[in-house]
Amino acid sequence: MNENGTNDPVRVMQRMFEEGFATGDGAVADELCSPDMIDHQFGLAGTGAEAIEHVKAAMADVHGAFPDIKFTIEDSTTTPGPQGDTVWVRAHGHGTNTGPFFGPPTGCEVDFTVIDVARVVDGQIIEHWGVPDRFALLAQTGVLGRLTSQS
């Protein structure tokens, strides 16, 4: 059991969003990610300490670009298995681009979806796949418009 007294995989994912990505504080990754974690997400892929450092950097980047970001898990399911519980979450992110994001801040509000799948053992993520809707972020912040107008 982790220090907050829960091994619930949905709670693990909720804490990653609330205590990590929403605050930019990567310390929660040290607690909730296994030292042997395997991450498959584009841009975060890696194993062990490298993967955890990628997650921490992503937390800092997301919070830096959208300091008021909030995440809500809107749907989840957990399947027990011999190699850990597999949790699937659909989360909604909402924030304002007041920090650098592929250029200067735009002040635009964003709403986007994140689909995360993780295997969790004893309150720690041992394997992760993530699919944030990056296209929505690029479109809503105007980055996509800047890229297409340069063509």
Image: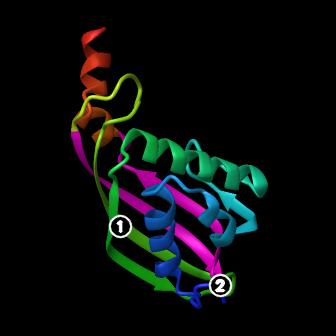
- 33 falls in the magenta region: no
At numbered mark 2, what does the secondary structure look like: helix, strand or loop? loop
Outermost residue to the top? 151
CA neighbours of label 1 inside 10 A, class few (<14), some (14 to 19), many (20+): some
Left or right of 32 in this view: 22: left
At numbered mark 1, what does the secondary structure look like: helix, strand or loop? strand
Residue 106: give its label: none
The spot of residue 61 in percent (x, y) is 50, 42
* Cα distance in 3D space between marks 2 and 1: 23 Å
Identity of the residue drawn at 46% across and 56% down: 23
Residue type at the position of mark 1: Arg
139 w.r.t. 68: above or below: above
Q: Which residue is mark 1?
A: 90
Which residues, given as a range, are shown in magenta? Answer: 109-134
Identity of the residue drawn at 46% across and 79% down: 10
Q: Nearer the viewer, residue 41 or 19?
A: 19
Identity of the residue drawn at 50% across and 67% down: 117
Residue type at the position of mark 2: Asn
